Amino acid sequence: MTTTDHSQMMKQWQFTKAGNPRDVLTMVEVPIPTTCADDEVLIKISHVSLNSSIAYRLIAYYGVVDPIGAFIGRPAVPEVDFSGMVCDLRGANVTEFNTGNINQLHFSLSTTRNFLKGDRICGTGPTGIRDITKGVLREYVLAKRDHIVKVPQHISLKDASCFTATVYTVYCFLVERANLKKGEKIFINGGSGGVGVMAIQLARSIVGPTGLVVATCSPAKSDIVRNLGADE
């Protein structure tokens, strides 16, 4: 009879069929990743941000079946956004050199980032159709160096776990595509939503006091949206 070395094992949530997450997600014990690419680091996950689009596509939550689900392998681990700590620099091309953090609001995947063991980070897991089943609803994950950023001490890991998808989405559209500039006007539909909250703050910092940020929201959220930086 063989015995399992539980010090080398981790827990993860996975599913094998579509359905309500309450019904189809199960917790299993699997080995902690030991092999990795040259540009990967091992992260001990502390928090995972739940993403509704992942639930729709992978688990067909509320009966919504996305065509992309046909390409999803099983068993699958959901979710892509997470935070945690670097616990092993396994990749040969990952060096111990301290650079940059999330305050830079720059998530270009071509940017070189190097890390130290113990660094507090947030990031995103695989998002391609073939790899999206290798999600982050688990205790440890191998993360690409270019897919994680360091979290400054004044931001909690709980809050940082929500940053990656929303901030990257906002940055791409406002900065890279819209090329928003100081003094310009911008309209943000859904200002109290996850992306809207980030969009208002980034837009405000870009357009400055001479620019105009207009957003929509329910009457109950109007004070929150104004406090984030919306003029109207």
Image (cartoon, grey):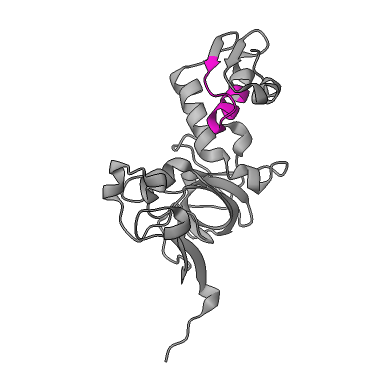
Q: Is residue 109 above or below residue 22?
A: above
Looking at the picture, how far across and down is residue 170, in whole percent?
51, 28
Identify the residue at horizontal 59%, vertical 14% (top origin): 214
Q: What is the quadrant of the N terminus in the image? A: bottom left
Q: Residue furthest right?
A: 154
Q: Residue at x 49, y 43 (%)?
A: 51
Nearest the viewer among 178 and 212 is: 212
Q: Nearer the viewer, residue 61 or 73?
A: 61
Residue at image location 66% in from the left, 25% down from the top:
220
Question: Is residue 218 magenta-colored?
Answer: no
State left or right for residue 99 relative to residue 129: right
Residue 21 falls left or right of residue 191: left
Split into 4 quadrants, where in the image is the C terminus? top right
Tag count in the figure?
0
- Residue 205 lies, in percent from the top left, at 64, 20
Q: Which residues are magenta?
A: 187-201
Q: From where the camera sits, is residue 134 visible?
A: yes
Q: Position of residue 8 (x, y in %)?
A: 51, 73
Magenta region includes residue 192 = yes
Q: Residue furthest bottom?
A: 1
Q: Is residue 216 left or right of residue 61?
A: right
Residue 91 at least partly seen: no
Q: In the rendered view, tell whether residue 213 sits above or below residue 77.
A: above
> Which residue is drawn at the image coordinates 31% and 51% (left, top)?
72
Of residue 118 and residue 187, the one placed in the foreground of this image is: 187
Q: Quadrant of residue 35?
A: bottom left
